[in-house]
């Protein structure tokens, strides 16, 4: 049987990375083979593109940023995601195309229709089975993320940028409510993990 594809999304500081490994382990405890990966990245080429995209010393045009994101994604799909799913493994990914609509569409202002065209061309109909969107006010996210490490090119953006990113994420959730589950990321870790446990249990039925 084909595996399931699950993605975690949210602005920086929303906590998705905190919950990623823990959520994947819920499936492993049920005997499911799980491959954890991330975007941009996940492959040798993807990780090199990630370095370019996140490097604050590498300013670039917004459309260049988009094309590099989708280039990394095409490799990721071809080398990692699609083969794992075909083998019956479940793939849990830190960000996917919703992040491109949020950061490059909402944050940078790249045309939504153009992103949709690139999504269709790159993914050939593949979408996650489930996306968990960790929703949090940008001001709180920035406070949480501050000082954790040196800020990358996106983390150096101002609150207005992140407000646009958040709204674009919520727009995606409104457009695809059957796929995208919105999690209130201002709750306690214990409360969120109980929700994730319930979600995992429902997926495994």
Image (tube, helix red, strand yellow):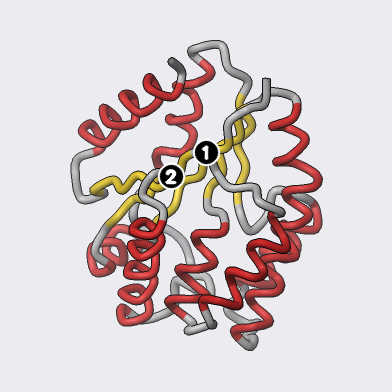
Question: Given contact means CB atoms under 8 Å apart, are the residues at marks 1 and 2 in contact?
Answer: yes
Residue drawn at x 46%, y 38% is 20
Which residue sits at x=39%, y=71%? 165
Nearest to the observer: residue 25 or residue 63: 63
Q: Nearer the viewer, residue 118 or 159?
A: 118
Q: Position of residue 70 (x, y in %)?
A: 69, 65
Badge 2 density bin: few <14, some 14–19, many ≥20, Cα 10 Å = some
Q: Residues within 10 Å of mark 1 (few under 14, many from 20)?
A: some
Q: Quadrant of residue 89?
A: top right
Q: Is 121 left or right of 35, judged from the image as shown?
A: right
Q: Look at the picture and state if 83 lies above or below 184.
A: above
Q: Pick whichever of labels 1 and 2 is earlier in the sequence.
A: 1
Quarter of the picture holding the N terminus = top right
Number of labelled discs? 2
Residue 166 percent location from the top left of the image: 34, 67
The residue beneath circle 2 is 179
Query: What residue do we see at 73% from left, 50% from top?
Result: 76
Asked if residue 202 is positioned above or below residue 74 in the image, the reply reads above
State whether residue 126 is above or below residue 141. above
Separation (CA) of disc 1 from disc 2? 6 Å
For mark 2, give the secondary structure: loop
Q: Residue 171 location, x and y as percent? A: 36, 65
The one nearer the camera, 201 or 205, is: 205
**Direction from residue 84 to residue 140 in the image, left or right:** left
Q: With respect to residue 99, does 89 lie above or below?
A: above
Give residue 113's mark: none
Q: Residue at coordinates 49% horizontally, 76% vertically from top-left?
A: 105
Quick one: quadrant of the C terminus?
top left
Question: Please, what secondary structure does the residue beneath circle 1 have?
Answer: loop
To which residue does mark 1 refer? 129
x%, y% of residue 202? 37, 22
């Amino acid at each position: 049987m084909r595996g399931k594809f699950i993605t975690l999304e949210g602005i920086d500081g929303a906590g998705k990375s905190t919950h990623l490994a823990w959520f994947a382990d819920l499936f492993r405890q049920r005997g499911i083979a799980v491959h954890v990966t991330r975007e941009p990245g996940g492959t040798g080429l993807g990780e090199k593109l990630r370095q370019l995209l996140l490097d604050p010393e590498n300013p670039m045009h917004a459309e260049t940023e988009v094309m590099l994101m989708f280039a990394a994604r095409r490799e990721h799909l071809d080398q990692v995601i699609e083969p794992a799913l075909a083998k019956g493994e479940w793939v849990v990914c830190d960000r996917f195309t919703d992040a491109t609509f949020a950061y490059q569409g909402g944050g940078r202002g790249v045309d939504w229709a153009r992103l949709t065209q690139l999504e269709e061309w790159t993914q050939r109909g593949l979408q996650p089975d489930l996306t968990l969107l960790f929703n949090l006010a940008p001001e709180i996210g920035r406070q949480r993320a501050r000082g954790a490490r040196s800020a990358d090119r996106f983390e150096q953006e101002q609150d207005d940028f992140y407000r646009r990113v958040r709204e674009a994420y919520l727009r995606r959730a409104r457009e695809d409510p059957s796929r995208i589950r919105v999690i209130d990321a201002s709750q306690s870790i214990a409360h969120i993990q109980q929700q994730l446990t319930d979600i995992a249990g429902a997926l495994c039925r």
